[in-house]
Amino acid sequence: MSDFNQLVVESAAKQFTLEGDIISVQPFGSGHINDTYRVVTTVDSGISHLLQRINHHVFPNVDGLMHNIEIVTKHLSKKVKVAEGKRISDHVLTIVPTKDGKLYIKDSQDNYWRMFILIEDTKSYDIVETEVQAAEGGRAFGLFQKQLSDLDASSIVEVLPNFHNIEFRLENLRKAIAKDVCQRVASVKDKLDFIFSREDRMKTILELGSKGELPLRITHNDTKFNNVLLDRHDKMQCVIDLDTVMPGYVAYDFGDAIRTIINPVAEDEKDVSKILLNLALYKAYAEGYLEEANDFLTTLEKETLVDGAFLLPYMQGVRFLTDYLEGDHYYKTKYEDHNLVRTNTQLTLVEEMEKNEAFMRKVVFDCI
Ligand code: GN1
Ligand code: MG
């Protein structure tokens, strides 16, 4: 939020345990929900800090959210450097406490703030460029799930219930259609036809889960590729954005990552003719992911990974379109049709993947 009052942001930053005086606080990153700032201080110790204003309309249980992150990061910290002879990342997202030892603050205007260490010399990619990057992303998220596979799930609060429940998301879309508060429904009829004609096949994972055939695990639930930090040699450093770490099915994380990796253009590209799937990156990610995940996943979990790859762009399309119909109150938007443009890219991805389903399944099959 670049128009946010600078003084309010700086006074929030001052309440965390920072060394030295603050030199600058500048907007940072491309998240759609929280507002992120990079904080630079006079002490040049090779690290800087990220201050975030938590969107508490999206995350009403800020306390539960921050405790989840604390539990997860503590658990991950115990797991670093596990595999002998094999290079893995030794970075875990690190919370910077407030001066009175808390995980976050609430200011006088009801803004919630938290701070993390920013790992220097790392980069996140909105668009993946090389197979090396894709494979590293796959390893990072595979390792992340593996390292959390022995965390007691009951210690984690489900901060956003039904987050990846497609029936819930479709129900919300139906409610938005019925209300049609912005009179936009008539103009998106083709999108709605596309969505509702695929409804049944998108419920596969949910149905297998409800029958108890797929285990619920602790998953990341926002595995956009830009939530992995890579170093200058494109080696994975850290998985970030742990807000949505909750119980889920592994295929959801696989699918959300593929949604951003296979797409050669931005999530809000207006020209959908540019969406020509990058299947080499898909393959590299799947191989990297399964290198880490093959040994702890069940056969059925592996078989449903590709269902997740279809489901997540579909569900993201449903969510963007619902927000468009409801008047754009959830995702940050920069222009009037932004959410509709985003819907288009997601549904086009689904359509393009449908043409390549056999290949996508074969890649996973060959790895398992
Ligand atoms: C949101 O804020 P950000 O960019 O990390 C959203 C994700 C979506 C994503 C789409 C809590 O993530 O679920 O996949 O936008 N986060 C929440 O880009 O809704
Ligand atoms: Mg997020």
Image (spheres, rainbow, N blue to C red):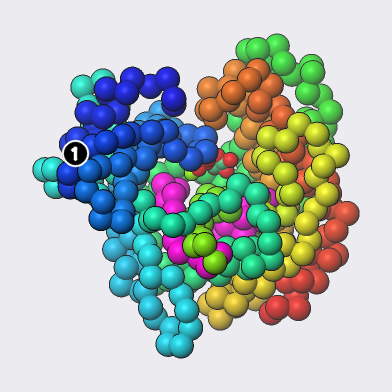
Q: Which residue is mark 1?
A: 21
Q: Is residue 297 above or below residue 58?
A: below
Q: Is residue 345 visible?
A: yes
Mark 1 is surrounded, within 10 Å at the Cα level, by few (under 14), some (14 to 19) or many (20 or more) other residues, namely few
Residue 244 in the magenta stretch? The answer is: yes
Q: Residue at x 31, y 40 (%)?
A: 39
* 121 in relation to 101, above or below: below
Looking at the rendered structure, the secondary structure element under dot 1 is loop
Q: Residue at x 56, y 74 (%)?
A: 293
Residue 18 sits inside the magenta stretch: no
Q: Nearer the viewer, residue 242 or 39?
A: 39
At x 54%, y 66%, the residue is 233
User: Horizontal and vertical percent for residue 239?
Assistant: 46, 58
Magenta range is 234-259
* In the rendered image, the vertical position of residue 275 relative to residue 172, given as above or below: below
Query: Is 136 on the left or on the right of 315, as rendered?
Result: left
Q: Residue furthest bottom?
A: 85
**Which image quadrant: the N terminus?**
top left
